[in-house]
Amino acid sequence: MADLRDDLRVYFDRLVDQAELATGDPRATTLPDRGGRRASRLVVALVAVGALVVVVALFGRAQLADDRSAPTRDVTPPVATEAPVNDVPPNDLPVVCGDTLPEPPNLPEGFVGPIPGPAPDNTVPPRNAEQLVVHWTDSVTNVEWRWPSDEDAFAPVPQGPPDPNLGMGIALLGVEGPDGSGRFSQVTYYNSNVFPIGCQTISRRISSDDRAVVESLKQGSVGLPFGVAPSP
Amino acid sequence: MGFETFLHDVRPRLARAFLAAYGVERGQEALAEALAYAWEHYGELRHMENAAGYLYRVGQSRSRTRRRAPTLPPPTDVGLPEVEPGLPGALLALTERQRLCVVLVHAYGWTHQEVADVVGLRRSSVQNHVERGLGRLRDAIGGSHG
């Protein structure tokens, strides 16, 4: 037994020494893939924006050509719609909803937080600097909140009026995974008309190695962001 | 506590844990990821009760995208001809958690609770992993150790 312990100690001490040398100072560490992934995302975004500009330009020209070629045109008076106009900010307009969640989450014992920023296993960055993104963790399971929610990343976002009885709508998406990292995740959207337009949806993302843990937390033990308890 | 002191405290523990769990290549990647995260988020980590455990999770998660089978070099390749040559192979035959727990407890003298805190297991689970892992290690290496 002593020999085995000695061998383990000597062997791993040597490996640790070598790893320490190879790792160096974290402040000078360049992580190989992350920069490449960021650059790839940027390229994809730029290409998408470029393609959108081209499509809009072509569509505008086609419309213009139609207008010019049309010999006569019936003029129909515009019909008013019931949809509100000009009171919904576009998705990319930064909105400051709050520095903290409307209600602190009721997490099981052992969770630490709020920690600013996305959970370590969530590669989706905040949509802008104004979005509140915080997470709690027990080192195995992460619970991340985004206010307003991240529509672009987690489509489909529930639409329509909130539940009139609760003043809140809840959309529980299914548990996904395991992903390539062996992680299960689940997203819930909460809608409430209590808050200004642009801040009416909060998302909660639970992620863990254990599907059962995600399922358990999904059912509401984590708490609700607007302080409204669901019907029993 | 300054970052240097923090690093001095958590780095050796993380290096040992990652190497024990993942071997050399992924272990180094996980350590680099965890330490880079520590530097970027030290303001938040300094207030955590178990920052080492949190960073272990960070390294574990972030290195998963480059998951690969753990590797441990032969002792002779790292200048240790006196070490049992079958040790790396026997360690790699253990489960990740068995290997991690056996190495941290029996090579470094960590308590079961210390292992549990860093890797996010219950103390009783650590004890089980140590007992089973050690038994398999003894069986694999044979009569020369024990």
Image (tube, coloured by chain):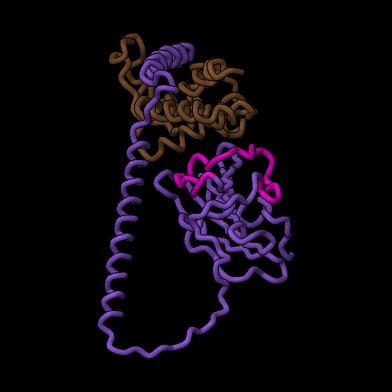
Chain colours: A purple, B brown
| Residue at figure coordinates x 59%, y 24% from the top left | B114
State the residue at coordinates (34%, 20%): B86
Residue B136 seen from this side: no
A53 or A48: nearer the viewer: A53
In the picture, measured across the screen, residue A144 lies left or right of residue A122, that is right
Quarter of the rendering containing residue A34: top left
Rendered location of residue A29, percent (x, y) = 39, 25
Residue B32, horizontal then vertical, whole percent: 42, 26
Q: Which residue is depicted at the point 41% across and 35% down?
A: B63
Query: Taking B6 as reference, is A207 above or below it?
Result: below
Q: Residue A127 lies in magenta, yes or no?
A: yes
Q: Which residues are magenta?
A: A100-129
Type of secondary structure dominating the magenta stretch: loop
Is B115 included in the stretch rendered in magenta?
no
- Of B128 and A140, which appears nearest the observer? A140
Q: Quadrant of the N terminus of chain B?
A: top right
Query: Residue A175: horizontal and vertical position, in percent?
Result: 51, 56
Q: Would residue B32 be visible to someone looking at this image?
A: yes
Horizontal side, residue A70 vs residue B58: left or right: left
The quarter holding residue B20 reads top left
A109 vs A122, nearest the viewer = A122
Q: Is residue A154 above or below residue B20?
A: below
